Image (cartoon, rainbow, N blue to C red):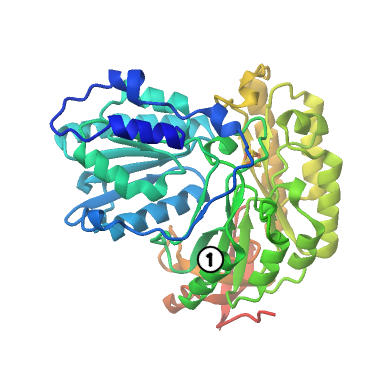
């Protein structure tokens, strides 16, 4: 829904209490579905920055005596959006709760990347229907990437009319208004804009930890890989201003956070949209090196925009860790072309060569899709050989499944599930093999571990991550939690390391 449609629909959707739900009217007059076509358009419209987010006086206290619960699916971007929504809820007076049964508002912050995630949400809606029947005052909302898709919104309107609110990724800052409308009206509140996107600063956040934090540096994606729904659900690439990001990281450092992860769908495109300054991702990383916070990570990278300046800056290390997640998706140039990735196997390998030359101890990880339409055995073998050539230390591997509304969904999915599964199995065996080797290379080494807490399986054991993002389990005092400690690695498994703590390190030298 665009801004005009939203305003028009609001006029018709005036709150009328005690009115029976009648969704037929959504299809006739009120409801304008989110449009993938509109979302695809990338105009020259200027990105609007709003740094004045505030809770309207009318809504203050709205949540007094009420509790909220947010279930999050998908990526870190969604996790971080949940932190923002939790911040807004708390500012409205709501309290968090750990169970849906105890909640007065339940939100499902959804993911549209994989079919699996979508099915889970619809399954969960089935369960929540019973809760809603027992507790009619409960407000149920669906937000996030799924809510940006017209097919999903239509399905909810038709089959899940007990849902009270649907809102998109561009509408999070309007949560107070959306909640208010849902309380006032008996109708489902649908607010999804298929716009290019703005940047809203000053949003409250309730972070889910006090050791590591996520920091958005940009929103949206303009790459339009043929299999991916993100450019449609998250809008066009728009960067936050560097001063806002640096200030947020400084504040996190002042509050004792030890590690931040910079978030963006394609962080390497950071700054491309600035018209008044020449400032790119490498410049931002260089500035963040000077902030007194022990570790800075970033995700996710796109090989196409990974430039030499960034490599040069990362090579200076300090608080910039030597782990780079660099999604390749396929080792075949022909496949990469069909995927719309805008680089070739040769370009990727050249980039890896430059990174390794500048940062010899770098740890590389990747994402790979197997069984993309038309992928031949030979092309899959190219992925296997590229994996060996790069020597990735780990990978997230996926079987291709079509996402409605993407160009790839129109391609014939002509690789059988049997073949896809067989390829995935072979690839995973290779991934495990390389992970085990990378872990074994740590034996006898002393590594810096950021201690996150007790191990999930044994409260006697502490666990944390190395700069290269390897999980380490070791015995140590509880006082080490939240600190950087040195651990001597004594044993290596495929995915984890065991060790002995040597000494608590209070701070790292930041150049
Ligand atoms: S770079 Fe490609 S895969 Fe990543 S979010 Fe953008 S379109 Fe999706």
Spot the residue most to the left.
18
Give the number of marks.
1
Q: Residues within 10 Å of mark 1 (few under 14, many from 20)?
A: many
Residue 469 visible to the viewer: no
Image position, residue 276 (x, y; %): 68, 59
| Looking at the image, residue 376 lies above or below residue 196 | above
Position of the N terminus, as image quadrant, is top left
| Looking at the image, residue 3 lies above or below residue 321 | above
| Looking at the image, residue 225 lies above or below residue 262 | above
- Kindly identify which residue carries mark 1: 464
Image position, residue 444 (x, y; %): 69, 70
The quadrant holding residue 348 is: top right
Question: Dividing the image into four equal quarters, which quarter contains ligand 1?
Answer: top right
Residue 7 visible to the viewer: yes
Q: Nearer the viewer, residue 446 or 112?
A: 112
Q: Residue at 28% of width from left, 52% of height from top? A: 98
The quadrant holding residue 247 is: bottom right
Position of the C terminus, as image quadrant, is bottom right
Q: Nearer the viewer, residue 70 or 414?
A: 70
Q: Nearer the viewer, residue 101 or 216?
A: 216
Q: Label 1: state its secondary structure.
A: strand
| Looking at the image, residue 370 lies above or below residue 47 | above
Q: Residue at 45% of width from left, 62% of height from top? A: 455
Compared across the picture, whether 146 is left or right of 230 comes to: left
Image position, residue 317 (x, y; %): 72, 71
Compared across the picture, whether 112 is left or right of 303 comes to: left
């Amino acid at each position: 829904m665009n801004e005009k449609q939203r305003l028009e629909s609001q006029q018709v959707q005036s709150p009328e209490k005690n009115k029976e739900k009648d969704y037929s009217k959504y299809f006739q007059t009120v409801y304008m579905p989110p449009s993938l076509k509109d979302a695809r358009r990338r105009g020259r419209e200027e990105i609007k920055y709003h740094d004045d987010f505030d809770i309207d006086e009318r809504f203050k206290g709205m949540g007094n005596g009420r509790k909220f619960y947010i279930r999050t699916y998908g990526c870190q971007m969604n996790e971080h959006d949940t932190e923002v929504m939790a911040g807004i809820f708390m500012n409205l007076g709501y309290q968090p709760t750990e169970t849906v049964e105890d909640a007065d508002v339940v939100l499902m912050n959804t993911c549209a990347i994989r079919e699996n995630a979508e099915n889970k949400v619809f399954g969960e809606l089935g369960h929540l229907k019973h809760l809603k029947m027992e507790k009619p005052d409960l407000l149920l909302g669906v937000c996030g990437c799924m809510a940006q898709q017209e097919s999903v919104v239509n399905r909810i309107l038709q089959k899940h009319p007990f849902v009270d609110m649907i809102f998109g990724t561009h509408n999070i800052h309007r949560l107070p208004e959306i909640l208010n409308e849902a309380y006032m009206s008996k109708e489902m509140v649908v607010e999804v804009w298929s716009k290019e996107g703005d940047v809203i600063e000053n949003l409250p956040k309730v972070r889910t930890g006090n050791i590591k934090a996520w920091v958005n540096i940009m929103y949206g994606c303009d790459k339009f890989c043929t299999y991916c729904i993100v450019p449609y659900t998250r809008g066009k690439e728009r960067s936050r201003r560097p001063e806002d990001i640096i200030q947020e990281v400084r504040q996190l450092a002042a509050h004792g956070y030890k590690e931040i992860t910079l978030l963006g769908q394609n962080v390497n495109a950071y700054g491309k949209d600035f018209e008044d300054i020449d400032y790119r991702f490498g410049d931002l990383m260089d500035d963040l090196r000077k902030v007194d916070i022990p570790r800075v990570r970033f995700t996710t990278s796109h090989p196409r925009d990974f430039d030499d300046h960034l490599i040069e800056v990362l090579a200076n290390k300090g608080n910039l860790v030597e782990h780079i997640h660099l999604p390749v998706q396929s080792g075949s140039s022909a496949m990469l072309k069909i995927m719309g990735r805008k680089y070739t196997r040769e370009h990727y390998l050249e980039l890896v060569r430059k990174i390794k030359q500048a940062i010899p101890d770098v740890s590389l990880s990747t994402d790979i899709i197997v069984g993309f339409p038309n992928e031949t055995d030979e092309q899959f073998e190219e992925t296997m050989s590229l994996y060996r050539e790069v020597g990735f230390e780990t990978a997230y591997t996926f079987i291709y499944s079509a996402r409605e509304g993407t160009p790839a969904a129109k391609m014939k999915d002509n690789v059988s599930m049997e073949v896809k599964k067989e390829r995935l199995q072979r690839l995973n065996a290779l991934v495990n093999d390389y992970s085990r080797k990378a872990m074994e290379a740590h034996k006898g080494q002393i590594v810096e571990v950021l201690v996150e807490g007790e191990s999930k399986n044994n409260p006697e054991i502490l666990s944390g991550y190395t700069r290269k993002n390897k999980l380490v389990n070791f015995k140590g005092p509880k006082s080490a939690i939240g600190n950087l400690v040195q651990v001597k690695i004594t044993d290596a498994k495929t995915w984890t390391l065991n060790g002995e703590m040597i000494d608590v390190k209070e701070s790292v030298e930041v150049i």
